[in-house]
Image (tube, rainbow, N blue to C red):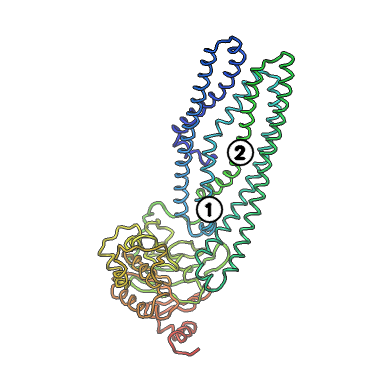
Amino acid sequence: MKFLSPYLRKRTPFIALGLFLKTVSSFADLFIPWILSFIIDEVIPLGEVRLVYVWGGLMVLTALLGFLGNVWGNRMAARVSSETIKDVRADLYRRISHLSTEGVDDFTIPSLISRVTSDTYIVQRTIGMMLRMGIRAPMLLLGCLVITLILDPILSLVIIAIIPFMLIFSIKVSTKGTRLFKTVQKKTDQMIRVLRENVTGVRVIRALSKTAYESDRFETVNEDVTKSDKEAAYNMAKVNPVISLMLNTGYVLVIVVGALRVKSGAGSPGDVLAFMTYVTIILNSVRVISRIFTALSKAAASLGRIEEVISYRDRLSYREEENGEQEDENAPAIEFRNVSFSYKSGGFSFENVSFKLNKGETLGIIGTTGSGKTTLISLLMRFYDVTDGEILLSGKNVKNMTAKELRARFGAVFQNDTLFKDTVKENICIGRTVELDKIDEAIRMADAKAFLEEAGGVEAQVAIKGANFSGGQKQRMLIARALAGDPDILLLDDSSSALDYKTDSVIRQHLAADRAGRTTVIVAQRVSSVMHSDVILVLDGGKVMGLGDHESLLRDCPMYRDTYDFQMGGRLV
């Protein structure tokens, strides 16, 4: 719980008030049985009905005080737990939003979603329980033990002898429970991943008649989660029955010993009645404490997962301030120097990739699926760090740039890019302050003006992931988003895959006419999308198979020539 300390310290006044109210209500509950004992042993024998009413009224007032203290203490607990987790959730989201791509790969998206939602909820419930009952139950337990020791030390020893065994048993089971609940949450992450894939790809699943297959796959992970959850539940299910058995055994012993002491004259009926009431409070308090141990087992597992993300140290880190290194106006806009890269998982790798692109030029990147085209873009924007070599922008190593300095250079459209549920204008601006005329110009260059006017203009609503627009229309809005910021470097990663040849050609003409010194990188499967580029990079398996303009590659690069012949009709298949 050390991780939560800074968050809880912010709410110290409310926590203090809540503890005070809980203390008042606890003392009130402890005082009531004593008043009852006093009435039975001291007031009733006097035969004064008025005194019975007075002390009875005091009992009612004490009960009301305990009720109000408990209610307002619970309100403070709810406030503290909600606001604390609000801050934790905000910090967790902020940390996730700044994770490197490698960091996201390490945790996986389903796991991150689970940590922000279910894990924070579990911790919130536990904080609330601790503030509601974590103070009250131990206070009632200790208070009752002290009072029972005063009332009848012999009877008290019966309960005191049992309590250590109950606490040891609860701690032992809860320690094992923490480990089991961590396993449950990991299995839940896997289930969320499968569910997310199925919901996202529901059209493909139905189109390929894979519904039964995916149902079986989900059933497998669902069964795995259920099996782990049952194991954890079975472990924690032992707590209440065993605790109840111990407590009820003690309760029976107290009744027997108490009856014998009253018979022998060593105790009074009022004391025994009060003692039994206190024993009942002790029983309930111990049950609550056992529930707290169960909740703490879950919360410890969830809190560990939250802390793991917030304290995660990216291997990829940005400078906080610029280091004063100056750019070279005569240097290439983009330069890869002997760049090698491999994923942490050991999957795909680059080997000794080198090329240069001058300011205002266009680089076309083409290659087979899995050749490394998108990875190259990720390295350029420093989503990953190179294993060896350097990437330079205007002569400055990307590692020597702040995140803001680096990101400000690019306008990018990625594969499977996202549109948000908002207006067209907000999807293009995406949080930036962009003047309306620049938005209109970006829409024109992306050849999106006609269909957006039909949809209602820039104030038209976009559904989640742009579901109310076609694939080609979504890509044109994404291109407009990239252009609206007037970037120095425009990255188009397979951004024309859903466009017809005519629209693709119109957009390329607009970009060429309005280049104005802008450096452009186009990743595409089509030769037609890159053939007019100043420099074309041909990749295959992470290696450079060709580098040059269209004519030189047709002459010197067999792979590019074969691709051109197949796509442009030079050869029949």
Please state which amino acid type lies under the numbered disc 1: Ser
Tag nearer the camera, 2 or 1:
2
**Mark 1 surroundings within 10 Å by alpha-carbon count, few (fewer than 14), some (14 through 19), many (20 or more):** many
Three-letter amino acid code of the residue under disc 2: Arg
Q: Position of residue 11 (x, y in %)?
A: 45, 36
Residue at the disc numbered 2? 291
- Regarding residue 306, the answer to whether it shows in the image is yes
Q: Is residue 36 above or below residue 436?
A: above
Task: Give the total of numbered labels.
Answer: 2
The answer to whether 559 appears left or right of 346 in the picture is: left
Secondary structure under the numbered disc 1 in the rendered image: helix
Which one is nearer the viewer's eye here, 554 or 268?
268
Around disc 2, counting alpha carbons within 10 Å, would you say few (fewer than 14), some (14 to 19), or many (20 or more)?
many
Between 452 and 542, the residue placed more toward the observer is 452
Residue at the extreme left: 437
* Rendering coords of residue 288 (x, y %): 60, 35
For the residue pair 124 and 254, the one nearer the viewer reads as 254
The answer to which quarter of the image holds residue 41 is: top right
Residue at the (68%, 22%) spot, across then down: 156
Query: Is residue 515 at all visible to an observer of this figure?
Result: no
Label 2 vs label 1: CA separation?
24 Å
Is 542 in front, or is 374?
Answer: 374
Q: Which residue is mark 1?
A: 114
Residue 26 numbered tag: none
Image position of 448 (left or right of 280) = left
